[in-house]
Structures are given as C-alpha cells and as structure tokens.
Image (cartoon, grey):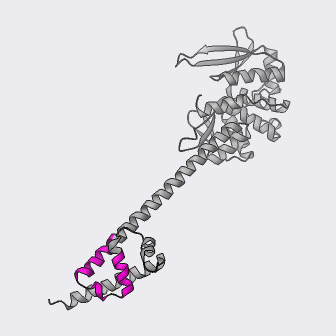
Amino acid sequence: MGTYSQRTKEELARKYPTQKCCVKAELAAIVRASGSLHLRANYSYAVTVLSESAALIRKTHLLLKKYFQLHGRIIVEDTGRFNRRRYRLQLIGARNVKRVLQELDILSAGLNLNSAIPPSLVRTDCCRAAFLRGAFLARGSITDPQKQNYHLEITTENEEFALGLNYLMNLCGFRAGTHHRKEYIVYLKGAETIGRFISFIGAHGAFLAMEEVRVIKEMRNEVNRLVNCETANLEKSVRAGLEQVEVINELKARKLLDKLPANLQEIALLRLDHPEASLRELGELATPPLSKSAVNHRMRKLLKIAETFVDQEEMNSPG
C-alpha cells in the first residue's frame, strides 16, 4: 500500500493535464525540481530526471512525448538499500536538450540557466495547479494524517526556485513558509490548508482520505473531552456529597438535626441515604420532586445553618 505520501503522489502521477499549457507547466516544474544538465564524454548534452518513483519517471516520459514528441531513455538502477530502485530518464542530444530547456523557460536565449518560475508559465489557475503538482511529485512529501501534526513540504537545493514556489503557493491562497537547513524547504502546516492544497493540485482521493481521518480524530477528541468533563463533574459531585454527609452526621451527633426546618430535614435525610446522588437525583427523590436549583438552595441553607449551630454549641460549651 505504501505510505500516505506515496499514495498521494501515485494518485497525482495518474493525473494527466489535457491542455498543452498545463503539460508544459508540469514538465517545467519536474525538470526544475528533479532534473540536471550534464556534459557527456562525447561533448553532447543530456538532461536527466532522477527519482525513486517509477510513476514519476513514467509520467515525465509520457509528458515529454506528448509535448515535444521526444522519447527519453529510462535507466533502472539498484540503490543497494532494502531492494529499492532508482530511475533515470535521460534526454540526449544538444539540439533536443536545448529545445526542451528553452521551451520550458529553463534556458534563456543567451544560454543562461534560469531557476526562477516565469510568470508566463503560471498565468492561469490550471497552469499553477499543474506546476505545483509537478514540483510536489518531484520533491514533495506529506505526513500521515493519522499523526498529530499535519505537514507538507517541497525541497530543493536552489534558493531562487524555493522562493518562487513560496510566492506561487501564497499567490494561490496557501500560507506557505520557507526555511533552510541542508536544503531549502517550502512547507505548509495545518489540516485545512494542506487539504485545500492537495485538492487544488488534483489529489482528490487523498484529500477525502485525509478528511475522513480528520473527522474521526475530531469526533474522538470531542468524546474524550466530554468524558473527561463528565468524570470531573461526577468527582466534584461525589466530593461535595461526602462533605455534606459529614456535616449532617455532625449535626446528628450533636442532636441538632431535629431543630432544622422540615424541608431541610428532608434534604438532610435524603443525602444521608444517598451520599453519591447528584443534586438533580436528590430532587427527584424528594416529595414533591424538586428542581436541581431548589435542592442546591436548600443544601446551601442547611450547611449555613449547621455552621451557625455548631459555632453556638462550641461558644456555649463550658471552657
């Protein structure tokens, strides 16, 4: 099945742009993010796209064929790590390389390499989505929504390309950030922002899977919050009930219970019989039944009178 990040990228790799401008935008992003220019031993040039994703290489190969009518050469390499393979897509020949790089606005007319994102490539929303899809496919990753923090990032060694991605993502309404460690990282945080982003670039299945997990997590958190709140209320109610029983037993021991008004005696006796009952439950046991607020009022009055009785008793007792 692979990780959530891998499944998201596999879904995006199956999404092929229909308009020529979007094909160009996605190819331009892939080559900028994962491509490199080489001078071969025979002094011919080659453009290489390197990835551990067979789906990305296959898609790049088909996009090259669709837009340029060119066939690249695919080389499969064994990395020697956990049976993982690495894939190279090579386009050879000075004329072909120059044509591709110039068409994708990577090579200027003066034969200078350009890492920036030309505005002409991303004029429309569909082209912006295609470009960001290509960049994410080539160098992106996303955390599993089952984890606590939601995080999506695209890495690059090129500062100019990173700043361009950051600008483009913010232009599309996503609050992106950038920082630099060993390489430049353009990132998004938060479930809502990341969900909108992956949906924007075409990973609708991954978006629905994320939403399902997010809803379940929110429901679980809400249930836990309610249970914790209910437990806290129950503990508070039981604690208050036991304190009330203690006061009433003190009155009983001092033979002061019979001096209370009849309505307070009733509440006191109900509390002794039902020490763990809530105020609402005590009210239901009363004759006639009382509301929770009425029971609370009587209980507070009872405790106040009890305090007065006990103070008077202690003052009148011989020293």
Instruction: Please name whichever residue, 195 or 264, is drawn nearer the observer in this view of the structure.
Output: 264
At which x and y percent is residue 108? 80, 28
Q: Is residue 245 magenta?
A: yes
Boundaries of the magenta span = 242-270
At which x and y percent is residue 117? 76, 35
**Image position of 133 with respect to 196: above or below:** above
**Image position of 44 with respect to 298: above or below:** above
Q: Is residue 82 magenta?
A: no
Q: Is residue 311 left or right of residue 60?
A: left
Residue 177 visible in this rendered orientation of the protein: no
Residue drawn 77% across and 26% down? 112
Dominant secondary structure of the magenta stretch? helix
Instruction: Please name whichever residue, 246 or 285, is drawn nearer the observer in this view of the structure.
Output: 285
Q: Quadrant of the N terminus?
A: top right
Q: Is residue 298 left or right of residue 60?
A: left
Residue drawn 67% across and 13% down? 75
Q: Quadrant of the C terminus?
A: bottom left
Q: Is residue 102 left or right of residue 79?
A: right
Residue drawn 84% across and 32% down? 21
Residue 30 visible in this rendered orientation of the protein: yes
At which x and y percent is residue 131? 75, 34
